[in-house]
Image: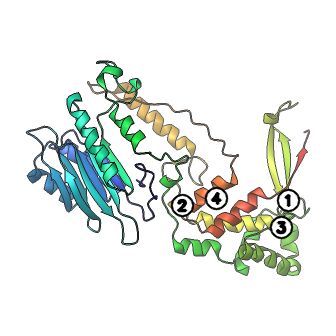
Amino acid sequence: MHLSGGRRRSPPTTPTMLVLSRNCRGLGTKKKFRALRRIVRKSHPEIIFLSETKISPNFLTPILSSLEFHNHHIVAPINTAGGLCLAWKLGVNIEIVSGNATFINAIVFLDPSSTPWMLSAIYGPPYKQSKSEFWNSLRQITEAFARPWLAIGDFNEVIASSEKRGGRDLASSSSGGLLKILASSDPIIPPNLEELILPSVSAEDNLMLCSIPKDQEIKLALNQLGSYKAPGPDGMTGLFYKTYWDTIKQEVRASVKSFFISGHILREQNHTNIALIPKIESPTSVNHYRPISLCNMSYKIISTILASRLKSILHKLISPLQAAFVSERLISDNSILVQEIWHTMRHKKGKNGLMAIKLDMEKAYDKMECPFFVMVLKNYGFDQRWGASTGRSFVTFPLHLGIRNS
C-alpha cells in the first residue's frame, strides 16, 4: 500500500512499503490461521495489523513468529472481545507511540533519507456512546503530528445509508465522526491511482531496453518481418530490404541507431497509411470496416526491436491471470474456469452459499493518451528515455486514410 491520506503534507518518497490490515474476528482456530497465512504469503506485507484477535498474547506471539513477524505490539483482548496487534518484519523500523483497545499509533521510518510517517492502526468502538471520545482522540493525533499519516483498520463507521441494512436510520445512529475528521484534516484524494502501480523494471532491464542495437539485432528484426506484406508510404516491402540489404544496410543501421541515441524519429519516417477493409458487403458505417496500419519499413524495424526487447520482461508486468491479448494464452481458458465455478455453485449443498458478481468492464484498448501511456511506463520503473521514445513513436505520425470498396 502506498502511503496516502491524512493532512496535506509533503508526500512520502520511495521506497514504498506494503501494509496489510485485517479484521480476524477471532484467530483461535486453525481455519482462521490458515486463511491469514494464505493472505500473508500472497501479498508479502512488511507490516500487518490484526483486529479482533480474541486470543491472549501468549497464543498470538507464536502465530506471528510462524509468519516471520518477529516484532510486534499487542493489545490483549478483554475476556474474549477485541484484541489488537501491530506486527512488522525484521528490517522495518517502527516506534510505538501509544496504544489502547481502539487503536495503536506508531511512527514508521522507511530509511534515513525519507520522511517518517505516522501509522494509526484502528478498530473503532462499535457502541455509539464511545465513538465521540474515539474520534476526538484520533483528531488530536492529526493535529499533534505534522507528518504524512496513514490510518488503516476497521472504523466501525457508516457513512452512507447504502452501507447498512436494518436498525435505526443513519441520521440517528451515526455521529458522522469519520466525515468530520476527514474534513478537518484536509485530506488529499489523488485524481489518479498511478501510485498503486509498483516498480517492476530493474536497472538491468532498462539498460537492455535503451541500449543501442547491434548490427545483428537490426538484421534479425528485419528477418522477422514478412517479405510480402503490403507496403507503407515508402512503397518498400520486406522483400526489397532483404534482397538489397548489402546495398542499403549502412543507411538503415544509421537510421535505427539514431532513434535509440536521440529518442526522436523523423515525422516522415513515422508516416502511416490506414487502409479500411470492409468486413461485410455494402458497408454503411465505420464499424463495418477493419483498419490496417501500413507503416514504413524503417519504422517497422525500430518497432520490432522495441517489441522484442519488451517481450523479454513482460512476465514481470502482466498478471498470470490475464488471458486475453497475451501470447500463448487463450481467453477461452478463463471461460472454462468460469463454467467450472458456476457448475460448483449450482450444485453446492449446505447452509453457506456462494456469490458471483458479473462485471461488464469496457476498455477502449485502441484509444490511449500519450501522457497516460508515459506515466504508466514511469510508474512501472521504465527509464525516461524508453517512455519518451516509445511515446513519440505513436503520437507524432501523420495518417492517411484509404477505403477499399471490396
Taking 180 as reference, is 339 left or right? right
Residue 379 visible to the viewer: yes
Vertical side of 272 occupied by 239: above or below = below
| Dot 1 amino acid type | His
**Which sits earlier in the primary sequence, circle 4 or circle 2?**
4
Q: CA distance from mark 4 to mark 2?
A: 10 Å
- Residue 375 lies, in percent from the top left, at 60, 57
- What residue is disc 1 on? 271
Q: Which residue is mark 3?
A: 266
N-terminal of the pair, mark 1 or mark 2, is: 1
Q: Is residue 209 above or below residue 195?
A: below
Q: CA distance from mark 1 to mark 2?
A: 29 Å
Residues tagged 1 and 4 counted as in contact (Cβ below 8 A): no
> Marks 2 and 3, how far apart in space?
27 Å
Residue 154 % position (x, y): 29, 40
Disc 3 from disc 1: Cα separation: 9 Å
Marker count (numbered): 4
Q: At numbered mark 3, what does the secondary structure look like: helix, strand or loop?
A: loop
Q: Secondary structure at mark 2?
A: helix
Q: Contact (CB < 8 A) between labels 3 and 4?
A: no
Q: Residue 67 appears in which quarter of the rendering?
A: bottom left
Left or right position of 208 against 241 = left
> Where residue 310 appears, x then y in whole percent?
61, 64
Residue sitting at x 29%, y 23%: 173
The colour scheme of the drawn protein is: rainbow
- Left or right position of 127 against 145: left
**Mark 3 and mark 4: Cα distance apart in space:** 20 Å
